[in-house]
Image (cartoon, rainbow, N blue to C red):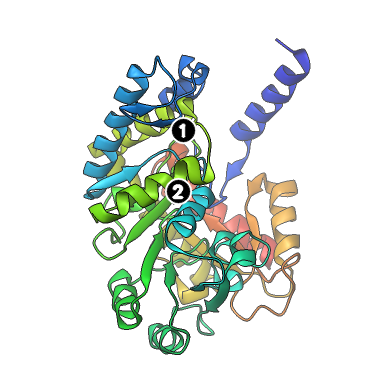
Amino acid sequence: MDKKIISILQDEITRQDNEHNFIASENFTSEAVKFYCGSDFTNKYAEGYPGKRYYNGCKHYDELENYGIELVTKLYGCNFANIQPHSGANANLAIFKAFLDPNDTILGMDLSAGGHLSHGSPANISGKWFDNHFYGVDADGWLEYDKIQAQALELKPKLIIAGASAYPRQIDFKRFREIADSVGAYLLVDMAHYSGLIAGKVYDSPIHYADFVTSTTHKTLRGARGGMILWNNPEYTKKINGAVFPGTQGGPLMNQIAGKVQAFSEASESSFKIYTQNVVEMADYMCTIFIENGIKLTTSGTDCHIILIHTGDKSGREVADTLESEYNIVVNKNSVPNDSRNFIDTSGIRIGTAAMVTKKGANREYFKEIAINIIKVIK
């Protein structure tokens, strides 16, 4: 084994052991998930789908993928799934490939309001191919559904995207369905941040409202890094599968798929529901401490694992750097609604409780100590 790589790995293990990880989009996998990601499943090409592979010797990969689809459709209560996307962004790209033409109109959440790059940002491929428009939030950070409805009626988009990377509250998926229906648009829900909480039934599910649901598999779901697509309408199946392979990807990463399948299995256990309950409970508990100490929060709280904290006189960048250097607390700088600073400095930080609940459980004293240290740095 290369000694340089071993040295880097050991340093990273030490970092993960010693630092307090409050990055909202990260988590710690089980040893079983890590085992499958490094297993002999990595040695085979399995282009295509179960029963329709382009290479011989794929019978066990058919079994694995079919089992994963069985688990994930039961977990989320949907009819169909594709678990091959290499990432959540790839899953979104496949939906665009399947159902949109270049220059079609998309209405998604603005990046500065808490949306994601792959929802039409000019910096992303989705922002180059389509006529992208964006909805925002009010001064306190809440989605304004009546304004989104008005935008939809004016724009007549072909696709509306619901879902966010920095929105701390429950998204009203039923209302988004009504808005999409009012203009004849498809509804895509990107539940990447909330997918584990939805599996644990502590955050409302979009499955019965969206035409298609995309997600990563490694955030609150705690699985191998990758993506997936879920849907109910059988008429979409051929388009979606064809858009993933060969439309936007080559061969699936079967070792990563094995890690996803293990995560679906773990998320089906009662202990996973307890974990998701603790994630939301600890986030709400930290919000109480922040508010009691005069710290401003977007929407004054949370319904999930995400807390968006205003950093006042200090930039989010400065606060994040100080937390890491002085307290070994890792967060990310993040824009807040109507941010007066640029995206490099920002006026806020985003934290999430999922990773450290995985490590610490519902340890109220631990999460209180972290909150107090964040308050010290901001003040």
Q: How far is disc 1 from disc 2 in space, using C-alphas? A: 29 Å
Q: Which residue is mark 2?
A: 243
Quadrant (top left, top right, bottom left, bottom right) of the C terminus:
bottom right
Q: Residue 225: give x, y in percent of width and height.
A: 51, 38
Name the element at disc 2.
helix
Q: Residue at x 67, y 44 (%)?
A: 328
Is residue 66 placed above or below 305 in the rendered structure?
A: above
Q: Which residue is mark 1?
A: 29
- Left-right relation of 192 to 12: left
The answer to whether residue 274 is seen in the rendering is: no
- Left-right relation of 272 to 294: left
- Left-right relation of 364 to 102: left
Name the element at disc 1.
loop
Quadrant (top left, top right, bottom left, bottom right) of the N terminus:
top right
| Disc marking residue 13 | none
Amino acid type indicated by mark 1: Thr
The crowding category of the residue bearing disc 2, from other C-alpha atoms within 10 Å (few below 14, some 14 to 19, many at least 20), is many
Which one is in front, 83 or 264? 83
